[in-house]
Image (tube, grey):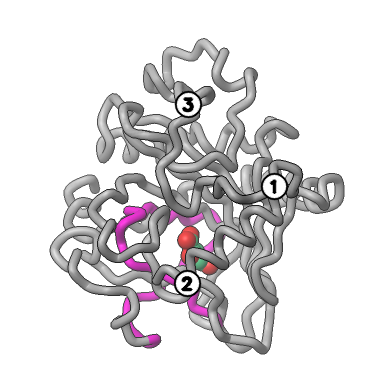
Amino acid sequence: MADDFHRLGYLHVPEALTAEQLVRFNAAVDRHVRDFPDNWISLSDSFCEGTNILPHTADFDEVIENPKTLEILKAILGENITFEEFAIMLRNPTANLNEVKGWHRDLIREYERRQEIDAISIMFYLSDVSSTDHCFAIVPESHNRLLDLNPKDVPASAGIDLIGPAGTAVIFHARAIHNGRLKQNSTQRRTLQAYYSNRLDQRTNEWTQIPPRLYQKQDASLPPHFYSKWNVTNIQEGVGKRPADISPDLPLSEVIREVQRRAKLKM
Ligand SMILES: O=C(O)CCC(=O)C(=O)O
């Protein structure tokens, strides 16, 4: 699986979550929407994201540490694997099918800096994603063999749609060109998303706080430096970093919205 991942830039993992976990995680998402409305940002009609979840609840720790997928992630990243980021994404039905980010690489939007992108993301589907639902789409090999492809030159219809039932996980390289492909008659799509990187690299983002519950954990089944970036303040210049000219009083949701707006201008 790791070889396939290195070649293609993504991996489709069936049945990464059990039916019982799906019920629990969906209920936890409902609770989070209800109890922490300020944690949610809306980037477009369809795109709603819950950020900085971990200080408020341990409900999703099990997702970040999911043995089945962590085994694969370890094979990809090695013993230096470390946790970076966690978010909940809701993709709501909409008639506006223009995707807010468009084809992009994660973390850094400047084309000239694409080589610096080095992190792996995993997206768990909490709802069924059929061919008529909003889905994650990716351009295979654009992290490596097709590295010189510019997201601006990728036609809207390109790439492949990664569909699958609830419980599916998709692992992708943050450097691979991807997009949310919106569909006319979609139901609400729910996903949980985490990022991992090498512990020796700069931190990719400052949006996800790693609480003491996690970084003080003694668990021999986890990689040795799994939560070691909890106090790293050296953040990679990109969409995970608070711009210096933004007021420290601005709520996180507003900061992320502004960072995304500026990122779009850099593409
Ligand atoms: O699956 C989607 O809706 C888009 C995801 C995306 O663009 C991202 O994770 O950066």
For the residues labelled 3 and 1, the Cα–Cα distance comes to: 21 Å
Q: Secondary structure at mark 1?
A: loop
Give the answer, above or below, for where 239 lies relative to 195: below
Q: Residue under circle 1?
A: 247
Mark toward the viewer: 2 or 1: 1
For the residues labelled 2 and 1, the Cα–Cα distance comes to: 20 Å
* Lower position in the chain sequence, tag 2 or tag 1: 1
Viewport quadrant of the C terminus: bottom left
Mark toward the viewer: 2 or 3: 2
Q: Give how far across and how far down residue 75 sits, in percent.
A: 26, 36
Numbered range of the magenta stretch: 156-182
Q: Residue under circle 3?
A: 232
Between 136 and 80, the residue placed more toward the observer is 80
Q: Amino acid at mark 3?
A: Val
Q: Residues within 10 Å of mark 1 (few under 14, many from 20)?
A: few
Q: Residue under circle 2?
A: 265
Give the answer, above or below, for where 34 lies relative to 163: above
Q: Is residue 70 magenta?
A: no
Q: Secondary structure at mark 3?
A: loop
* Lower position in the chain sequence, tag 2 or tag 3: 3
Q: Secondary structure at mark 2?
A: helix
Which residue lies at the image location 66% right of the left edge and 35% below the top edge?
Answer: 54
Give the answer, above or below, for where 174 lies relative to 139: above
